[in-house]
Image (cartoon, rainbow, N blue to C red):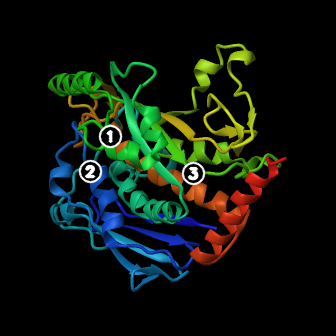
Amino acid sequence: MIRFFTAGESHGPALSAIVEGMPAGITITSEDINTQLARRQQGHGRGGRMKIETDKAEVLSGIRFGKTIGSPISLVIKNRDWDNWTTIMAQFEKPDEEIPKISIPRPGHADLAGRIKYGFDDIRPVIERSSARETAARVAAGTLSKVLLRALGIEIGSYISAIGPAAEPSPNIQLEELLSQGADTVAKQADLSPVRMLDKSTEDAALAAIDAAKEKGDTLGGIIEIFITGVPLGFGSYVQHDRRLDAALAAAIISIQAIKGVEIGRAFDNARQPGSKVHDEFHLTQEDGVTRLTNRAGGLEGSMSSGQVIHLRAAMKPISSLVTPLGSFDFETLKPSLSRFERSDTCAVPAAGVVAEAVVAPIIANALLEKLGGDHLDEILKRLTLYRETIRESFRA
């Protein structure tokens, strides 16, 4: 099974990831990884850090002649901004010069709980590791699983349906046609927009909202739509809580910094409807077997894939580092104070969509490997082809 760990601080020398469990025989190029890292850096409303960094991953192990070899894959993304932080973030010798301590926590951030939990007298270590800069390593790691899934006919894509007050009309009339061509088509279309939106009028409203928030020293959140196409029915399981596919997908998305809500399909709209208007009816045809005219369940039933498009929605809160300060206090004096500003973005919702694609990829890959097994891509592909045929045969008279 695939698992990965990341390491590194926001202003340290580098971010790194070790990915274990990737099957052998998967063709991987540096462009596969670096293209996703570049996508993560885009989006109207990003801050000054993205003008400094040009993220590229260096592969140290696990790939030979452009193919995975079954051993752990190690990745390193160097921080160009490290040159400006070698004193503040020195690993061993404490500098002779005095390093100012950060003692004022930001509301909405990890600052307060992290300082108390780990016993720091300075919030800087909390800021460094809790920063969303860490997601660059997760995008690099998750891209490996995306490439594996793509080779098996499974695609993952995303777009942004709302930023602040700018929300697309419902339903999005472009979406069904794009999804019929695969989730990657959705992502490619979204990437043409500076805010990764599909609807032009909503895009214009979002751009204006971001500019207005920046002018006020404020920040904006939004809603991310994630789609996974090509997943056959029966991935995941209902027999134990830790084998439920919906739970694993939700956990992966909620682990992204600033994500505060996850929805499968239109779950909250469904909650306000009677069951007769929620559940997706079966239709049996001679040509296609079982089909459905709706996908209100978001492609997941009984904690397993239903064979339809998997649709996940994520709610991202506004970033908690504001130019215009909020009320806080100073740990040194225990007196009220205004919060401090740490260099950040006005809006990072478009980038969070790319991160969401990356973090769900290992979840789907593991559900596939749990069902089919296999240590080499060719072996897995044969088993998946047989499984898909078995599904088709089960609906033939």
Q: Quick one: 337 or 211, which is closer to the camera? A: 211
Give amino acid for label 2: Gln
Do we see residue 282 in this rendering? yes
Residue 31, percent from left and from top:
30, 67
Q: Which residue lies furthest to the bottom in this view?
A: 65
Alpha carbons under labels 3 and 1: distance apart: 20 Å
Residue 344, percent from left and from top:
25, 41
Which residue bears the numbered disc 3?
Answer: 230
Mark 2–mark 1 contact, CB under 8 Å? no
Mark 2 Cα within 10 Å, few/some/many (few <14, many 20+)? many
131 lies above or below 20: above
Mark 1 Cα within 10 Å, few/some/many (few <14, many 20+)? many
Residue depicted at x 37% and y 22%: 168
Residue 293, picture quadrant: top right
Quadrant holding the N terminus: bottom right
182 lies above or below 376: above
* First along the sequence among labels 2 and 1: 2
Give amino acid for label 1: Ala
Q: Left or right: where does residue 279 sit relative to residue 57?
A: right
* First along the sequence among labels 3 and 1: 1
Q: Left or right: where does residue 382 sit relative to residue 161?
A: right
344 lies above or below 269: below
Mark 3–mark 2 contact, CB under 8 Å? no
Q: Left or right: where does residue 51 sit relative to residue 166?
A: left
Which residue bears the numbered disc 1?
Answer: 190
Residue 310, picture quadrant: top right
Residue 200, percent from left and from top:
26, 27
Residue depicted at x 61% and y 69%: 381
Mark number for residue 41? 2
Alpha carbons under labels 2 and 1: distance apart: 14 Å
